[in-house]
Each structure stands twice: as structure tokens, then as C-alpha cells.
Image (tube, rainbow, N blue to C red):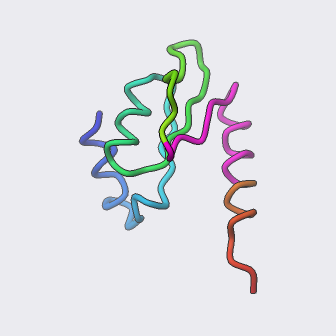
Amino acid sequence: MPGMVHAAPAWFGADAERTVAVGDHVSDLLAARAAGCWGVHVRSGRGVAPASGGPRDLGGFPDVSACVDAVEQRRTAHAPRP
């Protein structure tokens, strides 16, 4: 799994610093950390978020829709103003 998270930004021409990795297991968030991506936990019943969040962990959400809304709000709030 970490190899896939490391490779994904390059596959899509994205910067890992600006990439959000969404997962439902602790190992998904650890892979995001290792790759330098932002990590988001979606509570699907498969696992709980790590007890100690890293500086690039965006938290946990009940479902993908809530996750997308929160990430979009954060992106909009930090977008450069014209």
C-alpha cells in the first residue's frame, strides 16, 4: 500500500504536498504520512483513526461525502485570493 500512495501523485501529475489520501484503515493513513500526502480517515467500520494524528492528518469523517465537503472547505479557505 505505501508504494501505491507514493506513486499515485506522479501518475496523475500531482504534488504529494497537495495530495489528499483517503482511507478507512490505520495503515492507509500511515502510508499517506510516509508519502508526504495529507491523510483523511473515513469511518467505514474497517478501522479507527490513529490515536495520535500527524501534522498532515485532516481528521476522521463518517463517510466519503462528509470528507469531500471538509476537504473542499479547507481548500477554499486556503486558496489564494485574486
Viewer-nearest residue: 63 or 33: 33
- Tell me the magenta residue range: 55-72
Q: Quadrant of the C terminus?
A: bottom right
Would residue 38 appear left or right of 15 to someone viewing this image? right
Q: Quadrant of the N terminus?
A: top left
Q: Is residue 66 magenta?
A: yes
Q: Residue at x 28, y 52 (%)?
A: 7
Going by the picture, which residue comes out furthest to the bottom? 82
Q: Quadrant of residue 76?
A: bottom right
Disc count in the image? 0
Q: Is residue 22 above or below residue 17?
A: above
Q: Residue at x 46, y 22 (%)?
A: 25
Going by the picture, which residue comes out furthest to the left? 3
Q: Is residue 76 above or below residue 4?
A: below
Residue 74 % position (x, y): 70, 55
Viewer-nearest residue: 29 or 24: 29
Residue 16 % position (x, y): 40, 58
Q: Is residue 18 magenta?
A: no
Viewer-nearest residue: 20 or 80: 80
Residue 55 % position (x, y): 50, 45
Would residue 76 appear left or right of 46 to someone viewing this image? right
Q: Residue at x 49, y 23 (%)?
A: 50
Q: Residue at x 56, y 31 (%)?
A: 41
Residue 49 % position (x, y): 53, 23
Q: Is residue 25 above or below residue 75?
A: above
Would residue 28 appear left or right of 7 to someone viewing this image? right
Would residue 24 appear left or right of 79 to someone viewing this image? left
